[in-house]
Amino acid sequence: MELMRRGAKRKPMSDINVVPYIDVMLVLLIVFMVTAPMLTQGIQVELPKAVTSPIDLKDQEPLVVTIKKTGEYFVELGDTRDEALGLDAVSDMVAAILKNKPKTPVLVNGDSQVMYGTVIKLMAALQQSGVSNVGLITDSPQ
């Protein structure tokens, strides 16, 4: 009879204990805060150092053509990052993008170890694709 009394007095608890969920949320927040700066956009290259003034992009998303020190070309527009391309493929892709958006600014992001002739070949291909003005991306010397 005593066992029945104990069982009869207990009522099922209908509240959810949210403390463990808050702990998990805080751990995830810390993980994302630590890893977010490590996620960089673009292709990793060592930019040449130069004292320059920034280019005004007039609120347009630039088209960035990257040359790695291995001689590989990459075309980036916004968050899209494609695989390595040949010079002819870069020229065709840039021409197609400029056909749809003719006012798109074009920037060259070249590694400091890339030979000067490789950059000139890229700039000539961009000019043949219809690019009239090319900006070069550099790091500040500080």
Image (cartoon, helix red, strand yellow):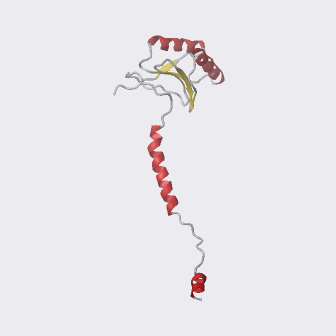
Quadrant assignment for the C terminus = top left
Say which of 101 and 69 sits in front.
69
Query: 8 or 105, which lies in front?
Result: 8
State the image coordinates of residue 106 (x, y, percent, origin top left).
54, 22
**Residue 81 quadrant:** top right
- What residue is drawn where x is 49% and y is 17%? 71
Q: Quadrant of the N terminus?
A: bottom right
Q: Residue at x 46, y 23 (%)?
A: 137
Residue 122: image x %, image y %? 53, 14
Taking depth in this image into account, of 135 and 139 the one nearest to the observer is 139
Image coords of residue 13 (percent x, y): 58, 73
Instruction: Specify the farthest residue to the bottom.
Output: 1
Residue 110 percent coordinates (x, y): 46, 20
User: In the displayed structure, does residue 34 sit left or right of residue 123?
Assistant: left
Displayed quadrant of residue 84: top right
Relative to residue 26, is residue 128 depicted above or below? Answer: above
Tally of marks: 0
Q: Residue at x 53, y 28 (%)?
A: 58
Q: Looking at the image, which is closer to me, 78 or 135?
A: 78
